[in-house]
Image (spheres, rainbow, N blue to C red):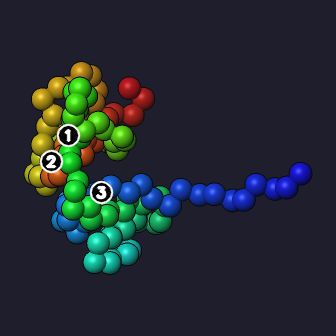
Amino acid sequence: MSRSPRLSLSATVLDAPDAHALADFYRDLLGWTVVQDEPDWVTLRPPGGGTGLSFQTEPLFTPPAWPAEAGAQQMMAHLDFEVDDLEAASAHAEAHGAVSAAFQPLDHVRIYRDPVGHPFCLFLPGA
């Protein structure tokens, strides 16, 4: 029996009309470092290394609908960020350009949209 190759998740990739602009938002939000900067591609990594976020320019990008709507671009994935203070993290996200989603179904989670419309959640641990 052959051994399986080693696979490790390097980054999650988000499409955007401008990879650099969206990377700037997440760099400011998370305090991460740019480790790769190409004309249509940017990768961020957290201090100390680990799985990163990459951004790819996609001129035909269409923001997803959330909650889902028939006939609209569907969300394929979203990002979850654990925070230690939901109110402070929410204010921080809004100060950097995140927009609160109209639908907020849970008390311990805040749903936001980044500047191009990708949903992301801030949540308290253990909730």
Q: Are marks 2 and 1 in contact (CB under 8 Å)?
A: yes
Q: Residue 66: give its label.
A: none
What is the quadrant of residue 73 in the picture?
top left
SS under mark 3: strand
Mark 2 to mark 1: distance in Å?
Answer: 6 Å
Residue 10 position in % (x across, y down): 50, 61
Residue positioned 53% across, 56% down in the render = 9
- Reading the image, the residue beneath label 1 is 112
**Pointer 2 local density, CA inside 10 Å: few below 14, some 14–19, many at least 20:** many
Q: Earlier in the sequence, mark 2 or mark 3?
A: 3
Nearer mark to the viewer, of 1 and 3:
3
From what the image shows, is residue 121 above or below residue 10? above
Q: Earlier in the sequence, mark 1 or mark 3?
A: 3
- Reading the image, the residue beneath label 2 is 98
From what the image shows, is residue 11 above or below residue 111? below
Q: Residue 15: give its label.
A: 3
Q: Amino acid at mark 2?
A: Ala
